[in-house]
Amino acid sequence: MPATFHTEQWVPYPVELVFAFFANPYNLPLLMPKFFKVRIEEAALAPPPSRPVAPDPALRLKSIAAGAGSRFTVSACLVPLPLINFRVPWEVEITEFAWNHHFTDVQLRGPFRYWKHTHSVSEETRANEAGVPIHGTRVTDDIEFTPPMALASSAIIRRQLASNFRTRQKKLDSILPKLVASLNRR
């Protein structure tokens, strides 16, 4: 039975913007810890279904999105030493895609015996310190995985995933304001 990992983050940006950012596989390297040196090696993108028209013209984005059937190969340096550049390939396929709701990637080939990652977004309003409601997005990640070897501990992998997602959350908090600023200049 696969092990699981779950994490959530709230960001003060609309679902359409947040989902579009995550649906573009070329944004993945921007979110990963630098020492992994993540890069997209190959990408065969399948078109997603037609994008719903956002009521706000500023959110009618024209970004790349990897629809169901998309396959891409990512590589990363799993040994974070400057003189060792051993890259591990990781081939995944997007198996589910629903605009502004979720998409799921499944490992076809890579470091795990099994990997399924569902990225979900949902609208959520929170109040700031002054009690003013702020509309935003809850980003949820649910991962099912089987470690690469029987000896590998799911607990160790969960700790590494938690560390990776803390990095991703910090980077997302830095990237999204810049993305919004660039959209406002259009």
Image (cartoon, rainbow, N blue to C red):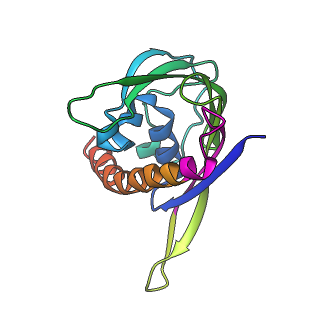
Q: Residue 100, how many percent across, how many down?
A: 60, 42
Residue at 59% across, 63% down: 124
- Residue 108: image quadrant is top right
Mark count: 0
Q: Is residue 67 above or below residue 146?
A: above
Residue 72 appears in the rendering? yes
Pick out the residue farthest to the front.
Answer: 151
Pick out the residue farthest to the bottom.
Answer: 130
- Residue 177: image quadrant is bottom left
Q: Residue 52, how many percent across, how many down?
A: 60, 36
Q: Residue 86, how many percent across, how many down?
A: 34, 24
The region drawn magenta spans: 136-158
Query: Could you say which is closer to the camera, residue 101 or residue 185?
Result: 101
Quarter of the C terminus within the rendering: top left
In the visual, does 32 lie left or right of 11?
A: left
Residue at 51% across, 34% down: 23
Quarter of the N terminus within the rendering: top right
Residue 121 appears in the rendering? no
Pick out the residue farthest to the right.
Answer: 1
Residue 169 on the magenta span: no
Residue 145 on the magenta span: yes
Q: Residue 72, how many percent across, how many down?
A: 50, 19
Residue at 34% across, 50% down: 180
Residue at 68% across, 48% down: 4
Query: Could you say which is closer to the camera, residue 130 or residue 109?
Result: 109
Q: Is residue 113 above or below residue 184?
A: above
Q: Is residue 130 above or below residue 55?
A: below
